[in-house]
Amino acid sequence: MEDVLDVYQLAYDPETPVICMDELSKQLVAEVTAPIPPAPGREGRADYEYRRNGTANVFMFTEPLASWRWVSITERRTKLDWAYAVRELLDVHYPEVDCVRLVMDNLNTHSLGSLYEAFEPEEARRLAKRLEIHYTPKHGSWLNIAECELSALSRQCLDRRIATMDELKREVQLWQEERNISTTGVSWHFKTREARIRLKRLYPARE
């Protein structure tokens, strides 16, 4: 916990950006009966019946101090999916940066080993050398700023029926562009000093 909180207190450095990453699953749901759109004096109506179209995985990457986020949609949440998303993050969005400080949970797919399962050793090593990983502690997902972004995405974009991967990608892309243009950010105030007071029960007792 203190390691992550210390990272959040670092000054903004475009040469060594702090990126937070998290993911969630989105069920794809299609309408069986076409909804009735709202009209003057009448709310819109949707039938309770729906059709399941599988699920999609939503990768969220965000640089809090730059008020920037990038969302990648995949069909699955495997080690390979994570590895390809990380490569795109590094090579497309941060091609000139030597080191990215990556904050994320310690899910078994979120490891440098996943890079070696996805790519040849030389390529995996090239990517790994550009990452400085900081894991949130077990049961400490609330420490991940990317979770705040996922919460906003869920409320503002995903809290309705979305039928297909293409529709999901299109809607998320629009949300991402609007949020980046507006430079909406997350203001993080919780620091190590406060943690040692408010979460004292989590520290080892000393005689």
Image (cartoon, rainbow, N blue to C red):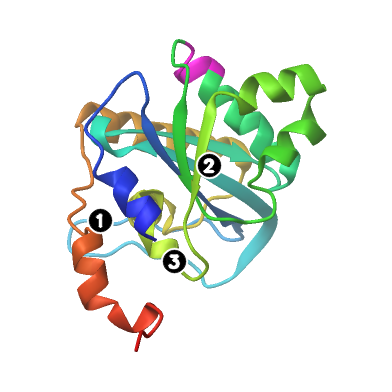
Question: What residue did someone put label 1 on?
Answer: 39
Question: What residue did someone put label 2 on?
Answer: 168
Residue 33 occupies quadrant: bottom right
Whether 201 is among the magenta residues is no
Q: Where is residue 50 in the image (x, y as percent from the top left)?
A: 61, 65
Amino acid type at image mark 3:
Gly
Kindly give the residue lying farthest to the top in the view shown. 96
- Foreground of the two, 113 or 178: 113
Q: What is the crowding at mark 3: few (fewer than 14 residues within 10 Å), some, or many (at least 20)?
A: few
Kindly give the residue lying farthest to the front in the view shown. 207
Question: What residue did someone put label 3 on?
Answer: 140
**Label 2 or label 3, whichever comes before in sequence order:** 3
| Quarter containing the C terminus | bottom left
Task: Tell us which disc is closer to us: 2 or 3.
Answer: 3
Q: Position of residue 198 (x, y in %)?
A: 22, 77
Magenta span: predominant SS is helix
Amino acid type at image mark 2:
Leu
Whether 93 is among the magenta residues is yes
Please provide the residue range marked out in magenta.
91-95
Q: Which residue is drawn at 71% across and 47% down?
A: 76
